Image: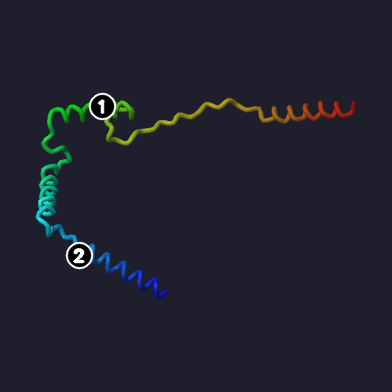
């Protein structure tokens, strides 16, 4: 019981250290440069698109998206962002003769009895 309380206290102090330590500022100039670049990239790609893509990268991305659409059932005129609609038709079932299996079982029993008597 005492060891679990000690372990819990260590965990809480470690978590408090981790949470209070990271506030988006860096002590090292290289780390600060990295943080600044990440913030700049986040501002420039706010709409979720690539930042400063070259024409070859755009062409390759378009080719890969077309290939993915074909694999997943998309194509021209198909909106892949909507949830698919499912249509289930009622299955036509043939009428079942409920007595047929019983008649077969009765015939098998009668045939089996004749074999035993002989």
**Relative to 27, is 76 on the left or the right?**
right
The relative height of residue 26 versus residue 50 in the rendered view (above or below) is below
The relative height of residue 46 versus residue 2 in the rendered view (above or below) is above
Q: Judging from the image, what secondary structure is the residue with disc 2 in?
A: helix
Number of the front mark, 1 or 2? 2
* Residue furthest right as drawn: 118
Question: Residue at image x 29%, y 68%?
Answer: 12
Question: Residue at image x 31%, y 26%?
Answer: 70
Q: Nearer the viewer, residue 107 or 99?
A: 107
Quarter of the image where one finds residue 55? top left
Q: Position of residue 94 (x, y in %)?
A: 58, 25
Label pair 1/2, CB-CB below 8 angstroms? no
* Residue furthest bottom as drawn: 2
Quarter of the figure with the C terminus = top right
Q: Nearer the viewer, residue 5 or 50?
A: 5
Q: Nearer the viewer, residue 94 or 110?
A: 110
Q: Position of residue 58 (x, y in %)?
A: 16, 30
Quickly name the residue at label 1: 66
Quarter of the figure with the N terminus = bottom left
Q: Position of residue 20 (x, y in %)?
A: 20, 64
N-terminal label among 1 and 2:
2
Number of numbered discs on residues: 2
Q: Judging from the image, what secondary structure is the residue with disc 1 in?
A: helix
Question: Residue at image x 17%, y 40%?
Answer: 48
Question: What is the crowding at mark 2: few (fewer than 14 residues within 10 Å), some, or many (at least 20)?
Answer: few
| Image disc number at residue 20 | 2
Q: Position of residue 35 (x, y in %)?
A: 13, 52
Quarter of the image where one finds residue 13? bottom left
Question: Residue at image x 19%, y 63%?
Answer: 21
């Amino acid at each position: 019981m005492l060891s679990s309380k000690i372990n819990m206290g260590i965990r809480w102090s470690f978590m408090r250290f981790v949470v209070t330590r990271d506030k988006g500022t860096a002590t090292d100039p290289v780390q600060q440069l990295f943080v600044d670049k990440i913030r700049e990239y986040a501002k420039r790609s706010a709409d979720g698109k690539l930042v400063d893509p070259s024409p070859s990268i755009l062409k390759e991305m378009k080719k890969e998206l077309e290939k993915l659409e074909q694999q997943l059932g998309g194509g021209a005129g198909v909106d892949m962002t909507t949830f698919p609609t499912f249509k289930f038709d009622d299955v036509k079932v043939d009428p079942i003769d409920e007595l047929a299996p019983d008649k077969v079982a009765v015939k098998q029993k009668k045939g089996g009895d004749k074999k035993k008597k002989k």
